[in-house]
Structures are given as structure tokens and as C-alpha cells.
């Protein structure tokens, strides 16, 4: 029998940075960095445009298991900007792929359960799937809830049912804010959540404020968001078009990608500000830090957040 020096942590998530320079779900990758010296970590996540088995960041090593749930062209339910809600909002018929996604997720978890000591799931639907597998193998499950879980449960009977079952089958629930904790109690009556607020990367804490005198000649406004309808980046562009800057040059930097990209470019063109709106696309985290350092103002017009990482940063 093989004896391991570290316990095995199985992580289940429908969003994860599948490339070493990807910024997708950076918060998930970041907390795993902190746990890498205590656990052997295996990440189970849906396959997307990247099909890699192992990747290293900052000297840590994770085993990544991307599972296939559909032909490549249809793998757009997860690991994409806005995740499953945004994908279904664009193409509601994709709901028929959801059972295949979670069926493949459960089968992959079962295959990877050998020597697993604990399962950590991100988001309620993944927590429900992990709870079923964990119960079968008598392995404890911890589920971290996000803002999208609360929004889904608040507007949908199915979302509320999933949240309740996730709470039932998880050994422990984690909320990312005290406000979210209160909402979960109101929705399903569960109050014994552990609140672990989203942290701030130490690199960001070391950023020096921009010299205020710089704004006399140039103003740089920054938006960091997935380009999906709920983030309302269109509001930021419309407000930028109304901005009176006098003699100052003004720029609107937009970091992120998603299905709204072409619509937002068309809006900027229509309002006559496209030359001053810079669409950077998805950037690796170190470049996001550099843009934060070079900006004067952050604009975050999102309609709903659980605990906004962007605002805290």
C-alpha cells in the first residue's frame, strides 16, 4: 500500500485558470497556492479550449483533470466568461447539456476518489455533486458558495432546491461575506456557515497610489469584468461618453472578455469614444496588477456581486 506524506484534497470547480497565464477564476487558483504545502491537490474541472493535465504556478504543482462532457465545439457551459448562467442566457437550449456535464463530473470524481481525504467544491451545483460522491465514499465535503449561487436561489425554485440539497450533503458550507451568510439563512434556513472573506493578493497591497497631479493632464479609468450582460459594462462606456474632461486626455481601459465584446465595441463607436476605449481582453494576473497601478479610477457597474474581488483589490 502506498503511503503519502500529505492528505489528498480533491477540488471540484466549473471555473479554473486552465492555462498558466489565464486569469479565469484566479481566486480559486490563489487559495490552492496557500494549501499546496499541506495537501496533494487534484482539480476536477470541465474541459474547454485547453486540455492539459498538469500545470505549475509559482513553484507549486497541481494535477488538473479536465473532463469531457460534449464535443469540443459545444464545451461552452463552463470555464467561459460568466460561466453557466451566461452560457444559458445566450443559448437556453444548452440546458440539455447540463446533465452530461454533471454526469461526467460525478464519474470523474468517482475515478479520482482513491486516497482522497476531503473534497472542496466551489459553487452550489458542484457542491451537490460532490456531496453525493462524498457520501458514497464517506469523505467529508466542504462547499464554498459564491454570489451567483445566492442570485440563482433567489430567483429560481431550482436554484433554491440545489442550494438546500448542497447544504444537506456538505459537511461544511463557506460564505465569502457576512451579507451572503444572512441571505443563505433567509433562503433555506441554514445559519451554521463559516464566513471566509475573499482575500487580497499581497502584490496588490504593495501598489503605490498614482500621483494625483497626473490627473491634471491624463485620466485613466479602469473596468475589470467578464463582458456579460450582468456586469453592465455598457453603463461605464455610456458614462465615459458623457464625461467632461476639459483639457485632459481620458482613457477607458476595459479588461475582460465575453459574449458582449462586439456589442460594447459597437456602443463605443456609436457614442464616438471608441478611439479612447481600450479593450485589453483577458490578461494574466500580473498584467491586471500593472493596469491597476497605472489607473486613477475603478468603475464597477455590476448588477450583483457576492463579495467583489475587483472592488476589494
Image (cartoon, rainbow, N blue to C red):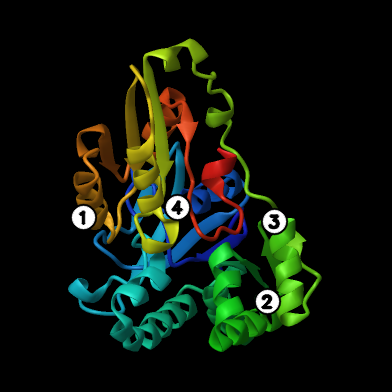
| Residues at discs 3 and 4 in contact (Cβ within 8 Å) | no
Do the numbered discs 1 and 3 sit on residues whose CB atoms are within 8 Å?
no
Give the foreground label among 1 and 4: 1
Image x and y of residue 294, in percent:
41, 23
- For label 2, the residue is 170
Q: Reading the chain from its start, which is encountered first: label 2 or label 3? A: 2
Secondary structure category for the residue under label 2:
loop
Residue at image position (80%, 72%) is 191
How far apart in space, not on screen, are marks 4 and 2 (Cα)?
Answer: 24 Å
Q: Residue 284's quadrant in the figure?
A: top left
Q: Residue drawn 58% across and 63% down? A: 146
Q: Is residue 2 above or below residue 101?
A: above
- The numbered dot on residue 281 is none
Which comes before the other along the chain, label 1 or label 3? Answer: 3
Which disc is residue 62 wearing? 4
| Residue 118 position (above or below residue 186) | above
Mark 4 vs 2, N-terminal side? 4
Residue denoted by label 3: 177
In space, the residues marked 1 and 4 are separated at their CA atoms by 35 Å
Residue drawn at the location 52% of the way across and 64% of the way down: 11
| Residue that label 1 marks | 262
Q: Could you tell me if the residues under marks 4 and 2 are in contact, i.e. CB atoms within 8 Å?
A: no
Give the spatial CA distance, label 3 vs label 4.
Answer: 27 Å
Counting other residues with Cα less than 10 Å from the Cα at mark 3, is it few (<14), some (14-19), or many (20 or more)? Answer: some
**Secondary element at image label 3:** loop
Amino acid at each position: 500500500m502506498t503511503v503519502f506524506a500529505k492528505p489528498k484534497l480533491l477540488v471540484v470547480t466549473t471555473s479554473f485558470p486552465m492555462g498558466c497565464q489565464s486569469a479565469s477564476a484566479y481566486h480559486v487558483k490563489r487559495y490552492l497556492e496557500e494549501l499546496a504545502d499541506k495537501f496533494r491537490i487534484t482539480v476536477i474541472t470541465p474541459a474547454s479550449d485547453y486540455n492539459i493535465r498538469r500545470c505549475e504556478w509559482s513553484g507549486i504543482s497541481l494535477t488538473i483533470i479536465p473532463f469531457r462532457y460534449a464535443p469540443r465545439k459545444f464545451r461552452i457551459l463552463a470555464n467561459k466568461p460568466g460561466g453557466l448562467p451566461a452560457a444559458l442566457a445566450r443559448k437556453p437550449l444548452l440546458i440539455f447539456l447540463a446533465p452530461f456535464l454533471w454526469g461526467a463530473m460525478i464519474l470523474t470524481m468517482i475515478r479520482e476518489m482513491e486516497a482522497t481525504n476531503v473534497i472542496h467544491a466551489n459553487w452550489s451545483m458542484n457542491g451537490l455533486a460532490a456531496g453525493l460522491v462524498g457520501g458514497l465514499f464517506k469523505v467529508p465535503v466542504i462547499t464554498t458558495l459564491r454570489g451567483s449561487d445566492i442570485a440563482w436561489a433567489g430567483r429560481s425554485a431550482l436554484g433554491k432546491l440545489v442550494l438546500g440539497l448542497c447544504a444537506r450533503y456538505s459537511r461544511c458550507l463557506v460564505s465569502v461575506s457576512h451579507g451572503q451568510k444572512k441571505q443563505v439563512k433567509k433562503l433555506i434556513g441554514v445559519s451554521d456557515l463559516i464566513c471566509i472573506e475573499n482575500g487580497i493578493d499581497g502584490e496588490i497591497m504593495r501598489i503605490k497610489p498614482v500621483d494625483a497631479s497626473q490627473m491634471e493632464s491624463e485620466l485613466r479609468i479602469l473596468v475589470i469584468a467578464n463582458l456579460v450582460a450582468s456586469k453592465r459594462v455598457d453603463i461605464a462606456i455610456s458614462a465615459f461618453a458623457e464625461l467632461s474632461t476639459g483639457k485632459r486626455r481620458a482613457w477607458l481601459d476595459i479588461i475582460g472578455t465575453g459574449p458582449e465584446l462586439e456589442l460594447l465595441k459597437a456602443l463605443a463607436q456609436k457614442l464616438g469614444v471608441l478611439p479612447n476605449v481600450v479593450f485589453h481582453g483577458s490578461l494574466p494576473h500580473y498584467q491586471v496588477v500593472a493596469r491597476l497601478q497605472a489607473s486613477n479610477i475603478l468603475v464597477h457597474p455590476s448588477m450583483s456581486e457576492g463579495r467583489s474581488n475587483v472592488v476589494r483589490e
